[in-house]
Image (cartoon, rainbow, N blue to C red):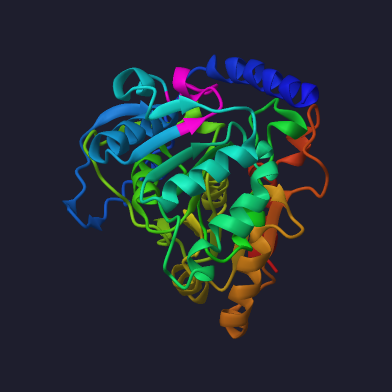
Amino acid sequence: MAMSTGLRRCGRRLVASVCNNREVSFSTTCQGNNVIQQLQHGQLQETGKSLNLCSAINQALHIALETDPRSYVFGEDVSFGGVFRCTAGLAEKFGKKRVFNTPLCEQGIVGFGIGLAAMDNRAIVEIQFADYIFPAFDQIVNEAAKFRYRSGNQFNCGGLTIRTPYGAVGHGGHYHSQSPEAFFCHVPGIKVVVPRSPREAKGLLLSSIRDQNPVIFFEPKWLYRLAVEEVPEHDYMLPLSEAEVIQEGSDITLVGWGAQLSVMEQACFDAEKEGISCELIDLKTLMPWDKETVEASVRKTGRLLISHEAPVTGGFGAEISASIVERCFLRLEAPVARICGLDTPFPLVFEPFYVPNKNKILDAIKSTVNY
């Protein structure tokens, strides 16, 4: 317990450092000029307020609590804003019976959320860092994911949403930088969602909260302050399990999610200078993922590159690769490329060598196109 508490204190110092970063605008392509989709309640308006990803998450939580009195937000340090300040102001507005702190026990936090959701409530759980989600693994995998199935659809905990920040942050080391999404993509019964930008984060989080299945919502903490764009202020939802082609191309398909999209976009821009046309796809929902959109793109380009921060072995990129090879084998002009994290614990001082950066992706684009 002492070690665990120490790690979390370290995390709070890490967050304070991250939050001092200067805000910069998110890239124009990843702002989602093409993401406006026909939704259940009509066309999403493009006008809005400039928000970073953290503020967009906060706005989505405000809307969720306002529009559904059965919604609750809880987790470690949540009632006074959380270490990243994503829940700031919620307890003051909605009261400490609906927004409250929990003990330092991830298994208990998720277990309580399952019970709350099973009683027809919307349980919005925060796990302070994705690195700390593993004590709750049994509750997620053996309880939440199987609740409906084992009862023959008599009971469910579909109102459960687990929010957690994931991924590299520049100086987080091996306990504040992991990307564990692939662990949960192996589990039937839960959905896994990862946004790339503030606009996407708000719409996808509201969809996740209102979905009829348990959802793990991974938030790229690198982008909490760095990603800034116009976000509609009203209540809107973006569909789950629909990938988006955010840049069209003809020579190679690139697939990613979360913070990695901005890195891949930079590589696409540099590749274009060398005459290579890249099609960039944001998967957005990893489970269940949109195979049809990726397949259609690969049938057009004949080449596929997947990039994620998690280690390459057993990463979700391997599942995408296997599925596309099964579906598009005769259309492939080159082996599927995977540019991912290394098969080591996430390093501290060697993070620049570990992460799949723009240059690694650009080299892989050129070698795949020239295969």
Residue 91, quarter of picture: top left
**Which of these two is toward me, 185 or 93?**
93
Q: Looking at this rendering, what residue extends furthest in the left direction?
A: 42
Residues 226 and 247: in front is: 226
Characterize the magenta stretch by its predominant secondary structure: loop
State the image quarter where residue 171 is shown. top right
Q: Is residue 365 visible?
A: no
Q: Position of residue 76 (x, y in %)?
A: 56, 27
Residue 267 in picture, x, y percent from top left: 58, 46
Give the quadrant of the C terminus.
Answer: bottom right
Q: Quadrant of residue 184?
A: bottom right
Left of 98 or right of it: where is 126? right
Place of residue 218 in the rendered image (x, y in percent of width and height, measured from the top left): 53, 43
**Where does residue 202 sit, x and y in percent of width and height?**
36, 40
Residue lying farthest bottom?
330
Q: Residue at x 77, y 58 (%)?
A: 313
**Above/below status of 231 relative to 260:** above
Residue drawn 76% across and 34% down?
174
Q: Is residue 367 magenta?
A: no
Whether residue 211 can be seen here: yes
Which residue corresponds to the image point at 56% horizontal and 81% vertical from the top-left? 327
From the viewer's perspective, tell me whether residue 188 is left or right of residue 212. Answer: right
Determine the residue located farthest toward the right in the rendered image: 344
What residue is at 41 percent from the left and 27 percent from the top? 99
In the rendered image, the vertical position of residue 362 relative to residue 304, given as above or below: above
Along the line of sight, which residue is nearer the eye, 284 or 212? 212
The quadrant of the rendering that contains the N terminus is top right
Please state the total of marks drawn on the protein image.
0
Q: Is residue 106 above or below residue 249?
A: above
- The boundaries of the magenta stretch are 74-87
